[in-house]
Amino acid sequence: MQNARQFALVIILAGIAFPQGAQATDLTTERLVTGLSRPVFVTAPPGDTDRIFILENRSGSTGRIRIFNLNTNTLNTAPFLSISGVGTGNEQGLLGMAFDPDYDTNGRFFVYYIQAGGNGTTRVATGTVSSNPDIANSTLTNILSLSQTFSNHNGGWIGFGLDGMLYVAIGDGGSGCDPFQAAQTTTNLFGSILRLDVSAGTSYSIPSDNPFIGGPERDEIWHYGLRNPYRCSFDRLTNELYIGDVGQGAWEEIDVVPGDSKGGENYGWDCKEGFANATASCGAPFGCSTSDPELLDPVHVYQNTGFFNDCAVSGGSVYRGCAIPDLRGTYFFGDSCGNGSVWSFRYQGLPNPAITTWTNQLDAVVGNVDNVVAISEDANGELYICDLAGEVFRIIPDGAVDLPTPSDYDNDGDVDDFDTVAFRDCMGGPDDSYTNCLCDVFDTDDTDGDVDLRDFADFQRKYTD
């Protein structure tokens, strides 16, 4: 069935003249909530379009997960979950959360936090929702613990890939310039992205296709050579992994891992910072050689211009929402150091993509976007900015919304063979149910709630010359 539909799609594409695309929609933000205690992340269970879950990094030594109701625009008074005894250092506290892909049936979620004591202990733990969908059971089960060498560079992101595995971002252990070359030492977990099978629920196992099984390296490691991968995300359509890796003192970087990666990539810290030799920020010794051809360069870098300017990248998310069709496929990211900087680019497989700056557009009528510690998504793929000063903003269109270029399903500005692939991915759900086509714009023909080839043909008739 899939091959027949792909062939039909190619025939349709071949016979259509496509109009030119419009300029990108202008953006702004609306403030949803204020008065939070250091909000650092927004997420939602798969398919839950009524709520977002906001992580409060810490209030005193307690981290909290709060629920904001998108239908009533209200913040629930009672937290979904409170975690006591979290570290109170600047980079500690509650940092990450991920919902099991089958959360609607098993009620499982995972959290990443730093427990107080010494330099802190990284904990990845799992919990379950109670009979009240807005309240979690209070008991958490640790599945991973790692004592920090220093109190900073704690990473903090966790997320599920399309393969159903849990990915965990661990910093290099802290201090400055990675004094123990931990990020290049694969016999420890520091400076790495881990890949874990958590299907057992209360423990993890090693996926059989992880790259270092059987060697002296830690079997959990999927990628390494990272300094502080504080915010990462998967593109829900392509499975590409975007990594925001905080630099030492010269360069901030974004790395992009291909969606079909087999693991084992080395991103070069601590002998490289961005595209450059790390000697601009650090002195020898280094854990690797800059001439090593195995080291992978970032996709984008920007200069560290100092505290209260731009000095610590916050990796973001690829927009896959419905409200701004022409920006689907665009990656948004920011910086946490006070400028309120937000940028975007479209990744098309090459380094140094064209960058769009949104900073001046995104201050809301009420509130100011300042310390951008996360740009993350809800179940519909809409994007939210967490400002460490206590505010959460939603990115929205400012005025008229530009229609996407008809049939430009990969949103690259051109209609070509790649759009055939993008439409195939859209219809890649179970039994060809088009479960990846989230937006009503695709359900144009009979508006029956299902996106199918009839809707695609009707879309062509309505929006092409």
Image (tube, rainbow, N blue to C red):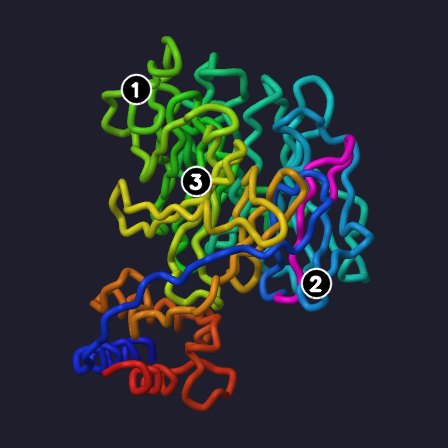
Magenta-highlighted residues: 49-64
Quarter of the image holding residue 305?
top left
Residue sticking out furthest to the top: 284
The stretch drawn in magenta includes residue 62: yes
Helix, strand, or loop for circle 1?
strand
For mark 2, what is the residue?
Answer: 73
Amino acid at the residue labelled 2: Asn
For mark 1, what is the residue?
Answer: 277
User: Could you tell me what secondary structure mostly forms the magenta stretch?
Assistant: strand
For mark 3, what is the residue?
Answer: 243
Whether residue 154 sits left or right of residue 403 in the image: it is right
Camera-nearest label, 3 or 2:
2
Residue sticking out furthest to the front: 365
Residues at marks 3 and 2, CA–CA distance in whole angstroms: 31 Å
N-term mark: 3 or 2: 2
The stretch drawn in magenta includes residue 94: no
Quarter of the image holding residue 270?
top left
Amino acid at the residue labelled 1: Asn
